């Protein structure tokens, strides 16, 4: 039996047939506003609230106060309490970018991982993380090293990645092949706003539902509609674009 980590996100764990493979690294990609950071905040928050699993949130783009406000604005009222008692550990851009050096940032994290108290980790975003490196070879080497360290430390990790294209198959980067799973968040414009969808394209070691499912973002975070037959972009005769 493959051990799994539940995201606690309504509908998503059903698509994943139980959850994310334990100790794996999953890339969450999407264009701006698709809900990547919300999904990651929800993943860390649900770990503490629902499963007694502590989490680490690495943000190369936001301050700790910005993350708190974002979490509380979507209904995660206990976020700061969990940060204060150590169940959620936040490293924001002020800490991670202080030395402008990956080795320094990694040393900070390794100190926290020595005790093995944490189960979940988010890196937001991979684009900022990659600015540490000068070329693709160096980026690939350090990304593999980093994901191995996280796995060996017993962490189940989500990494966010900015996606410029609306449809992911038109923009596939090296990082998509280096991670264990790929989740795409897609948003398409309509006359009245936007429609949002999730597509789990890959998850090693387990069977997944590969349809594209509609999602809603509301108070409480992301909700995935499990019955895709009436909504799915794969089954519609006309594209929602």
Image (cartoon, helix red, strand yellow):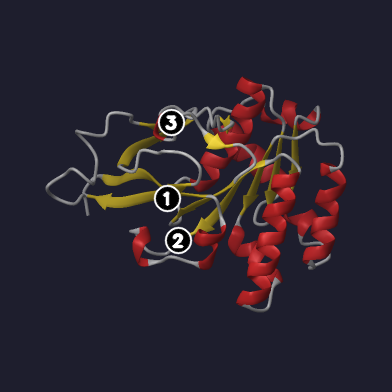
Contact? badges 2 and 3 (CB < 8 Å): no
* Residue at image location 80% in from the left, 67% down from the top: 101
Residue toward you, 60 or 159: 159
Q: Which residue is mark 1?
A: 184
Provide the secondary structure element on which disc 3 rests: loop
Between disc 2 and disc 3, the foreground one is 3
Location of residue 116 (image quadrant): top right
Which callout, 2 or 3, points at the residue further toward the start of the chain? 3
Contact? badges 3 and 1 (CB < 8 Å): no
- Mark 2 to mark 3: distance in Å? 25 Å
Left-right relation of 217 to 234: right
Contact? badges 1 and 2 (CB < 8 Å): yes
Provide the secondary structure element on which disc 2 rests: loop
Between disc 3 and disc 1, the foreground one is 3
- Residue 17's label in the rendered image is 3
Which quadrant of the rendered structure holds the N terminus? Answer: top right
Q: Which residue is mark 2?
A: 163
Question: Where does the image place residue 35, in percent across and percent down from the top left?
Answer: 47, 45
Question: Where does the image place residue 89, in percent across and percent down from the top left?
Answer: 76, 38
Let me know if residue 92 appears in the view.
Answer: no
Location of residue 42 (image quadrant): top right
10 Å neighbourhood of mark 1: few (<14), some, or many (≥20)? many
- Mark 1 to mark 2: distance in Å? 9 Å
């Amino acid at each position: 039996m493959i051990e799994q980590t539940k995201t606690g996100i309504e509908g998503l764990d059903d698509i994943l047939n139980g959850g994310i493979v334990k100790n794996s690294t999953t890339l969450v990609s999407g264009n701006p506003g698709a809900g990547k950071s919300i999904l990651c905040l929800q993943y860390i928050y649900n770990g503490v609230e629902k499963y007694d699993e502590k989490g680490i949130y690495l943000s190369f783009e936001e301050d700790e106060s910005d993350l708190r406000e974002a979490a509380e604005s979507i209904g995660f009222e206990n976020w700061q309490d969990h940060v204060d008692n150590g169940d959620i550990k936040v490293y924001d851009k002020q800490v991670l970018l202080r030395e402008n050096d990956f080795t320094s940032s990694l040393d900070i994290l390794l100190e926290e991982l020595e005790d093995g108290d944490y189960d979940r980790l988010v890196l937001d975003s991979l684009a900022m993380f990659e600015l540490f490196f000068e070329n693709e070879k160096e980026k690939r080497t350090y990304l593999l090293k980093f994901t191995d360290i996280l796995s060996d430390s017993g962490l189940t990790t989500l990494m966010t990645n900015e996606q410029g294209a609306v449809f992911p198959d038109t923009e596939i980067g090296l990082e998509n092949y280096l991670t264990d799973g790929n989740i795409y968040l897609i948003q398409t414009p309509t006359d009245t706003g936007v429609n949002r969808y999730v597509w789990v394209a890959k998850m090693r070691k387990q069977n997944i539902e590969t349809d594209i499912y509609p999602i809603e973002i509301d108070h409480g975070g992301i909700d995935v509609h499990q019955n895709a037959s009436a909504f799915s972009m794969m089954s519609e005769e006309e594209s929602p674009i």
